[in-house]
């Protein structure tokens, strides 16, 4: 019984990784590995992806927050920088946190399954 209890956690973790059960993300290859495989196979896409930026601020936060550019055009596998301008309109220091409104893994799945 003690041995089964001790082994239960790693066995359950492996089960979840193999089946995707319990919200565990299944990945056979990383995005970088998939891009490299496509480059080696000669199936690299020249299609551009348009990444659009917005800057929503919570109603109670006295900030002016805008993207420096509205969009960036990139090809799968390319890196790009995005810049934002933030201005604190209050008289006290404020700390904010940025978040995605579309999660990168959902976008990556859409991009690579549609090619």
Image (tube, rainbow, N blue to C red):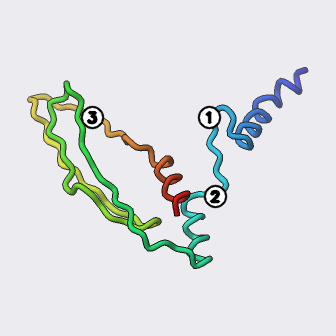
User: In the rendered image, which residue does mark 3 sit on?
Assistant: 96
Q: Who's the residue at 52% across and 59% down the image?
A: 114
Which numbered disc flags the more N-terminal residue, 2 or 3? 2
10 Å neighbourhood of mark 2: few (<14), some, or many (≥20)?
Answer: few
Comparing 100 with 95, the one in front is 100
- Give coordinates of residue 58: x percent, y percent: 24, 29
User: Looking at the rendered structure, which numbered label has been put on residue 23?
Assistant: 1
- Give coordinates of residue 86: x percent, y percent: 17, 44
Where disc 2 sits, the SS reads loop
Comparing 6 with 60, the one in front is 60
User: In the rendered image, which residue does mark 2 sit on?
Assistant: 29
Q: Who's the residue at 55% across and 67% down the image?
A: 35
Q: Residue 18 occupies which quadrant of the picture?
A: top right
Where disc 1 sits, the SS reads helix
- Give coordinates of residue 32: x percent, y percent: 55, 63
The answer to whether residue 25 is left or right of residue 85 is right
Q: CA distance from mark 1 to mark 2?
A: 18 Å
Quadrant (top left/top right/bottom left/bottom right) for the N terminus: top right
The answer to whether residue 91 is left or right of residue 59 is left
Which numbered disc flags the more N-terminal residue, 1 or 3? 1
10 Å neighbourhood of mark 3: few (<14), some, or many (≥20)?
Answer: few
Q: Are marks 1 and 2 in contact (CB under 8 Å)?
A: no
Count of residue discs: 3
Which numbered disc flags the more N-terminal residue, 1 or 2? 1
- Give coordinates of residue 14: x percent, y percent: 75, 40
Q: CA distance from mark 1 to mark 3?
A: 29 Å
């Amino acid at each position: 019984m003690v041995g089964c209890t001790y082994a239960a956690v790693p066995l359950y973790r492996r089960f979840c990784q193999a089946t995707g059960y319990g919200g565990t993300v299944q990945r056979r290859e990383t995005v970088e590995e998939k891009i490299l495989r496509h480059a080696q196979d000669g199936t690299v896409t020249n299609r551009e992806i348009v990444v659009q930026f917005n800057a929503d601020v919570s109603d109670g936060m006295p900030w002016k927050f805008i993207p420096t550019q509205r969009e960036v055009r990139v090809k799968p596998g390319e890196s790009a920088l995005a810049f934002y301008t933030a201005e604190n309109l209050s008289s006290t220091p404020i700390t904010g946190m940025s978040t995605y409104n579309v999660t990168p893994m959902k976008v990556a799945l859409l991009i690579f399954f549609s090619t």
